[in-house]
Image (tube, rainbow, N blue to C red):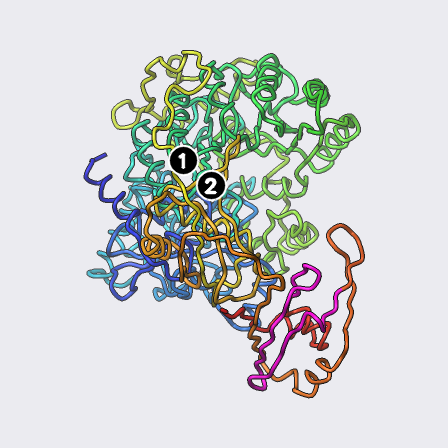
């Protein structure tokens, strides 16, 4: 990593800019000034997709190029989809509201099999034919990538190409190839696909002919000798240049609302059921130096304070204690939550335990996977009962209160004794909870054989078998300290069909979509009855793909995809499972011969351990040197407007927006004391969702000496459109107005109130209404006394002034609905603006 490259990116993200309406760090480009436009489509809801790390990587890499513009798309929720169809609105990009079919490339992330119908939703709303052979050369090039692409065959008929493996380098090669083709090519997509097929990691399904053997197994015959076996693309090492240091910060609350710091990629533990542990090999750890530079730049660019350490096995990172200690020194000691998904007992050194005690805890997950040591040895979990118990004991002593145990049922060679072991182990661990109301959450899922794993040929449990074992756990895990959760067995069955399916499933997906299947990964939207109808209509038997044991010589649909793991190694691991023989972790032992490394261009990247992490510490070695004392701060009063689209921010969202904007300015601010420090910031009032305001007030403690003008300009550069600081002064306490009042301007779509109605209301001596207070008591309010004045400005606009009543703030919407009898729908559609003065 070149120092000048680091400094360039750091300067770019720290340069104040005025955001143009979308989320912080969104990139908007003039499409007429770029050579290539790329749509990055995530086939799930925004709340899931916006925080997906792979999407952030591609968005950053592409938009760092001046000649490429990348924009995002997400699957709509059912009500939004219905509205889009009613209004004939296609899928539009988040950045420039450009239709999906107007991009040069559409890249789709394949993260989860139950997202597949959502891909067709995006296509259908955008007028894009489902099947690749039905799309002429005028349509965008449509590519897919992600873990599900390691068995691309179920979706092969829908895509022009797939990217297999790490996308950082491939996406650049694809972009260069398409740009060159646009300038000098013959305009035929087949020519472009031939060019792309020569890039390592790119698979073109149309360059294979499909046939079937006598048993119905798919056979693929390549058209070109140099495109007969697709080798996975592997990023040799993780560098600063590949990291999205300025990820998009949503205004809403996504599933992962924190800075995600990928500390390593790949896992060497070798669990035989785990696809990720195979397809992401070898282990590549990011350097401590790069991680600290990334964290510093990303905290400055986002305003986050919570950090999640991202890795398949976070506790295995070689310099974890040193990393945690340094992270806690950043951001004036405000990095007070570091998410550690799971750490084995043997990794909890005295220093690491001391560091963990100093951070706020989120959730802690332990994945025994199986209930007995016998079965854990079969799956090569390398986790003993003693270690599990010690890990739970340590987690409790270190302050974690919410602990999750993750198990699977239906593993190869499983017996009912193993299911009993899940109940026994869970109860035994729950017995350590002697205080409080906390419970252990036991999560149970069905084992699904995945491609490129030692167990890829094993049978999946039938629905009846799954239900039988699940019922046993329900009956035998009735414990006050255990909360049992499970995945719907029908969802697991469907996932298994797509995980090991082939091209025969294409009509099934289309039929399921036509029947109304959407967002199948969401339990409240999943409808297995519709899938049963789709299976029946297409004549596809799900058992052919799930509950059937594969013969040793049976061809797999994904045999032409080279994950880098030798097939002989997978077969050897399967035999070792039968004999309950363990395979050691190659990180700490000799090479196991999986085949992924050539030890020249591809090899494990493990950072050097300096040994200091083994030293016991009562507290971190260093203390932040830039923490200011309380008397270094002074209280400021800020006035701001909240107009136009900003009215859709709720009060909690507003608090988060301001807090992160302040952090991005780099100004020192005062924090509360205690274990979970928070910014000393407060609002005079909480503006209701949907209401605009010309003047709201915010109070915050900045470092003494800051000029009000500097505060205004710096904050306005970091706030979204619609929110603007208009005044900033030192706080001066003044006597509070005994009867605070506010004036509102209300605009309607059509006339709904007339002056005689207003006059009649004003002539009333009182207008009492009753409702329940937060404490459950009947509260009476005189709306007539609360209304100081009201007048019509035009047939569709009125102005009213309200005063507080018995210390209660009356909302204009309440006067409209209950006082004037305006229909609730009309009230909700009205534009209400709080005026200044």
The quarter holding residue 634 reads: top left
As drawn, 752 above or below 816: below
The quarter holding residue 497 reads: top right
Give the quadrant of the N terminus: top left
For disc 2, the marked residue is 258
Local packing at callout 1 (Cα closer than 10 Å; few below 14, some 14-19, many 20+) is many
394 and 81: which is toward the camera: 394
812 and 77: which is toward the camera: 812
Residue 557 lies in the magenta-colored region: no
Q: Which mark is residue 582?
A: none
Local packing at callout 2 (Cα closer than 10 Å; few below 14, some 14-19, many 20+) is many
Q: Measuring from the top left, give residue 540's x and y in whole percent.
A: 62, 49
What stretch of residues is rendered in magenta? 781-810
As drawn, 124 above or below 672: below
Left or right: residue 181 versus residue 460 is left
Q: Measuring from the top left, give residue 700's x and y in whole percent.
A: 45, 48
664 and 162: which is toward the camera: 664
As drawn, 291 above or below 86: above
Q: Are marks 1 and 2 in contact (CB under 8 Å)?
A: no
Kindly state the secondary structure of the residue where label 2 is placed.
loop
Residue 790 lies in the magenta-colored region: yes
Kindly state the secondary structure of the residue where label 1 is placed.
strand
Mark nearest the camera among 1 and 2 is 2
Q: Measuring from the top left, give residue 164's x and y in whole percent.
A: 38, 41
In this view, which residue lies farthest toward the bottom?
756
For disc 1, the marked residue is 261
In this view, which residue lies farthest toward the front?
735
Q: CA distance from mark 1 to mark 2?
A: 9 Å
Q: Residue at x 55, y 18 (%)?
A: 577
Q: Measuring from the top left, give residue 315's x and y in whole percent.
A: 46, 23
The quarter holding residue 142 reads: bottom left
Count of labels in the image: 2
């Amino acid at each position: 990593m070149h120092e000048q490259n680091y400094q360039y990116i750091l300067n770019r993200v720290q340069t104040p800019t005025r955001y143009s309406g979308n989320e912080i760090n969104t990139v908007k480009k003039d499409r007429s000034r770029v050579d290539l436009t790329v749509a990055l489509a995530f086939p799930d809801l925004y709340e899931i997709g916006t925080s997906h790390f792979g999407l952030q990587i591609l968005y950053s890499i592409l938009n760092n190029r001046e000649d490429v513009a990348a924009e995002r798309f997400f699957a709509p929720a059912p009500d939004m989809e219905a509205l889009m169809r009613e209004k004939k609105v296609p899928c539009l990009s988040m950045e420039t509201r450009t239709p999906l079919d107007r991009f040069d490339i559409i890249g789709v992330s394949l993260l989860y099999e139950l997202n597949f119908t959502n891909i067709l939703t995006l296509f259908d709303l955008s007028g894009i034919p489902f099947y690749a052979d039905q799309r002429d050369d005028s349509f965008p090039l449509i590519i897919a990538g992600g873990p599900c692409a390691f068995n691309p065959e179920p979706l092969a008929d829908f895509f022009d190409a797939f990217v297999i493996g790490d996308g950082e380098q491939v996406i650049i090669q694809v972009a260069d190839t398409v740009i060159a083709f646009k300038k000098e090519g013959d305009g035929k997509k087949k020519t472009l696909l031939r060019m792309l097929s020569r890039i390592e990691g790119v698979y073109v399904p149309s360059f294979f002919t499909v046939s079937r053997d006598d048993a119905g197994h798919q056979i693929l015959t390549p058209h070109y000798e140099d495109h007969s076996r697709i080798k996975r693309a592997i990023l040799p090492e993780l560098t600063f240049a590949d990291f999205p240091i300025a990820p998009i910060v949503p205004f809403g609350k996504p599933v992962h609302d924190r800075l995600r710091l990928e500390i390593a990629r790949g896992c060497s533990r070798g669990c035989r059921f785990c696809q990720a542990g195979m397809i992401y090999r070898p282990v590549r750890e990011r350097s401590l130096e790069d991680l600290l530079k990334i964290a510093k730049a990303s905290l400055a660019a986002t305003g986050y304070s919570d950090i999640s350490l991202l890795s398949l096995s976070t506790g295995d990172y070689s310099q974890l204690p040193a990393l945690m200690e340094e992270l806690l020194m950043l951001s004036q000691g405000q990095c007070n939550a570091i998410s550690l998904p799971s750490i084995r007992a043997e990794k909890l050194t005295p220093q690491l335990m001391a560091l963990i005690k100093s951070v706020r805890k989120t959730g802690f997950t332990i994945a025994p996977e199986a209930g007995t040591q016998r079965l854990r040895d079969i799956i090569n979990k390398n986790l003993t009962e003693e270690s599990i118990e010690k890990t739970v004991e340590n987690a409790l002593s270190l302050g974690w209160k919410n602990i999750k145990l993750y198990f699977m049922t239906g593993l190869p060679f499983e017996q009912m004794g193993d299911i009993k072991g899940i109940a026994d182990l869970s109860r035994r661990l729950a017995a350590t909870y002697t205080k409080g109301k906390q419970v252990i959450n036991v999560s149970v899922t069905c084992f699904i054989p995945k491609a490129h794993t030692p167990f890829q040929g094993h049978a999946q449990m039938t629905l009846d078998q799954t239900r039988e074992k699940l019922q046993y756990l329900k009956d035998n895990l009735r414990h006050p300290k255990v909360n049992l959760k499970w995945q719907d067995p029908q969802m697991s069955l469907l996932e298994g069909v797509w995980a090991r399916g082939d091209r025969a499933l294409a009509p099934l997906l289309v039929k399921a979509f036509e029947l109304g299947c959407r967002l199948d990964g969401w339990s409240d939207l999943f409808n297995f009855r519709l899938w049963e109808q789709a299976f029946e209509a297409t004549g596809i038997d799900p058992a052919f793909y799930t509950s059937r044991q594969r013969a040793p010589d049976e061809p797999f649909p994904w045999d032409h995809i080279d994950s880098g793991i030798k097939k002989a190694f997978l077969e050897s691991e399967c035999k070792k499972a039968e004999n309950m023989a363990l395979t050691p972790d190659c990180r700490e032992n000799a090479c196991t011969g999986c085949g992924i490394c050539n030890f020249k261009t591809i090899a494990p990247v493990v950072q050097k351990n300096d040994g200091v992490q083994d030293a016991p510490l009562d507290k971190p070695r260093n203390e932040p040197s830039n923490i200011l004392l309380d008397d270094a701060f002074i209280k400021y009063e800020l006035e701001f407007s909240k107009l136009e689209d900003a009215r859709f921010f709720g009060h909690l969202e507003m608090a988060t927006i301001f807090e992160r904007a302040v952090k991005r300015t780099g100004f020192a601010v005062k924090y509360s004391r205690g274990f979970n420090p928070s910014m000393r910031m407060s609002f005079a009032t909480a503006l209701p969702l949907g209401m605009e305001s010309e003047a709201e007030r915010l109070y915050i403690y900045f470092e003494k000496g800051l000029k009000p003008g500097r505060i205004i300009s710096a904050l306005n550069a970091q706030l979204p459109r619609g929110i603007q600081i208009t005044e900033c002064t030192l706080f001066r306490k003044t006597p509070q107005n005994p009867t605070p009042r506010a004036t509102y301007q209300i605009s309607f779509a059509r006339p709904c109130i007339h002056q005689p109605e207003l006059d009649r209301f004003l002539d009333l001596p009182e207008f009492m209404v009753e409702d329940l207070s937060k404490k459950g008591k009947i509260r009476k309010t005189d709306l007539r006394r609360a209304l100081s004045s009201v007048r019509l400005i035009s047939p569709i606009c009125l102005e009213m002034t309200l005063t507080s009543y018995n210390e209660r703030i009356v909302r204009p919407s309440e006067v409209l609905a209950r006082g004037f009898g305006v229909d609730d729908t009309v009230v909700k559609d009205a534009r209400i603006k709080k005026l200044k003065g």
